Amino acid sequence: MNLTIRSAALTRAALALVAVNPVTTPVSAVPVVVGTIFVGDSPRAMAITPNGRKAYVANTWGDTVTAINVVDDYVSDTISVGAGPHAIAISPNGQKVYVANTDSDTVSEISVATGDVTNTIPVGDGPQSLAISPNGRKIYVANNRDDTVSIITLARGQVSDTISVGAGPHAIAISPNGKKAYVANSSSDSVSVINVATSVVTDTILVGNAPSGLAISADGRKIYVTNNSDNTVSVIAGARGQVTNTIPVGDRPQAIAISPNGRKIWVANIFDDSVSVINVATRGVTDTILVGDWPNSIAFKPRGGKAYVVNSQADSVSVINTR
């Protein structure tokens, strides 16, 4: 009997030791929605200044741009622009915001310092997307309704060249070295590759059905394209100009963005109100984040920590903690 009591005492002591010193298994951080910012009517695009202090949201049905203080996540201003603002980009020096107005066929230039519209530049028919060259000298505007790209020379404040691309250009991005521009043509299921030095289309790459978004890796070696009608992301090897992988994601992927550290790709899926998070190394979806209604744009703070997802049919921006 004494042996039984002693054995029971030892068992209790062992259990107490486990309780005091629990074994823990490291868990990777999962992105979590931590807040919602309400903006204008039918927001479609968002961009954050290089210093990470301000963000600007293009509200398509409101003909406005909402300015957000992203230090404390509150709306600080509302700016009237052209009709149907659909895309937005910020100059590399953080001093100007450029907005593509789809229904007035213009690009509005906004001063970050004053919040005033300082120029309105006529472009092609139905500007849908725009990208600024790394040196800040030119803007490339994808015109969805006339299948062209307008090139704006900012020193002149006007269009200096127009390039014909595929059918229904929906998104545009410029390589980090500034040598190439890539255009996703939603109606011809292709990506046009433009030589920036010559303003000539040098290649056309076939991708999935209805390509709608583009993102380029920091080294320029990979181009990621969302294919809206077949729920995939095409991975293009930049040097070869060929699709090397196809990644399944959520329902009707639209916008795409790469995390500041380059390890994750985020894809906004408009039909299931979610964001698919892709691991770049494994080329697989590791997380799915539920956001607001009809997510249509993604922006990261430059130093990481937070991401912002624009929800077009909820008139809101989801704030996501990425740490």
Image: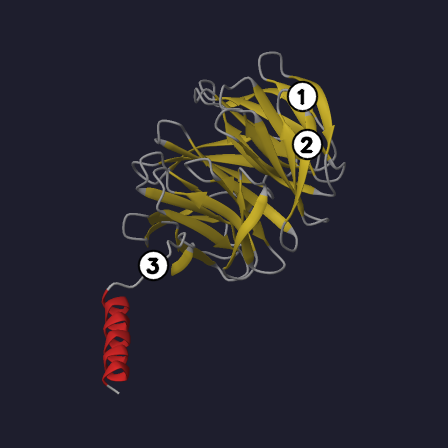
Q: What's the residue at 57%, 37% (across, down)?
A: 129
Residue 141 in the figure: left or right of residue 31 = right
By what rule are the colours in the image chosen? secondary structure
Whole-percent x and y of residue 293?
Answer: 54, 62
Image quadrant in which you'd find residue 103: top right
Give the residue number, with chain letter if any, for mark 2.
244
- Whether tag 2 and tag 3 are in contact, CB under 8 A, the answer is no
Q: Which residue is mark 3?
A: 24
Amino acid type assigned to the residue bearing label 2 in the image: Thr
Q: CB of mark 2 within 8 Å of CB of mark 1?
A: yes
Seen from the viewer's position, the closer of residues 109 and 300 is 300
Q: Which residue lies under the disc numbered 1? A: 240
Is disc 2 placed on a helix, strand or loop?
A: strand
Report crowding for label 3: few under 14, some 14 to 19, many 20 or more residues within 10 A (C-alpha): few
Report whether 245 appears left or right of 67. Answer: right
Mark 2 → mark 1, Cα distance in angstroms: 9 Å
Q: Quadrant of the N terminus?
A: bottom left
At label 3, the amino acid type is: Thr
Residue 25 pos. (x, y %): 37, 56
- How packed is label 1: few (under 14 Cα within 10 Å), some, or many (20 or more)? few
Q: Amino acid at mark 1?
A: Arg
- The residue tagged with tag 3: helix, strand or loop? loop
Residue 44 in sight here: yes
- Which mark, residue 25? none
- Measured in 3D between alpha carbons, the distance from the residue under mark 3 to the one under mark 1, in whole angstroms, is 46 Å
Q: In terms of image quadrants, where is residue 161?
A: top right
Query: In the structure shown, which secondary structural element does the residue marked by tag 1 occupy?
Result: loop
Disc on the earlier residue, 3 or 1: 3
- Can you tell which of label 3 and label 1 is closer to the viewer? 3
First along the sequence among labels 2 and 3: 3
